[in-house]
Image (cartoon, helix red, strand yellow):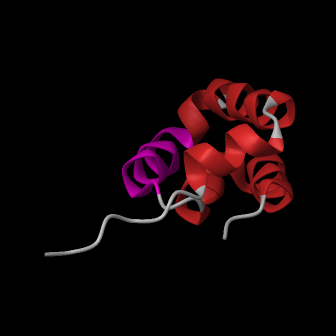
Amino acid sequence: MKSKTTAILLCFFLGGFGAHWFYLGKMGFGILYLLTGGLCGIGTLVNFIQFLMMSNEDFDAKYNTPAAPQA
């Protein structure tokens, strides 16, 4: 279960490296942020504000959904 607080802290301190996206399991965004410096810092700032404003229920619905069973 992913923690909203951890995602916010990773975004604030290591957002330019995409650490928050790697933590949330979004590898594509993590690599993009790693290669572009958090989209020149603007993307990191936007994500930080989004995470702060997002309710815990919305965060859980978006990032803590169970994976679909493999057939």
Measured as percent of width and height from the top left, residue 58 is found at 70, 38
> What residue is rendered at 44% in x and 47% in y?
35
Residue 10 lies in the magenta-colored region:
no
- Which image quadrant for residue 5? bottom right
Which quadrant: the N terminus? bottom right
How many numbered callouts? 0
Question: Which residue is at the front of the view, 71 or 34?
Answer: 71
Horizontally, is 35 left or right of 22 in the view? left
- Position of residue 22 relative to residue 49, above or below, is below
Measured as percent of width and height from the top left, residue 65 is found at 52, 57
- Which image quadrant for residue 10? bottom right
SS assignment for the magenta stretch, majority: helix
Res. 18 in view: no
> What residue is rendered at 77% in x and 37% in y?
51
Horizontally, is 30 left or right of 4 in the view? left
> What residue is rendered at 42% in x and 53% in y?
31
Magenta span of residues: 26-37
Horizontally, is 31 left or right of 23 in the view? left
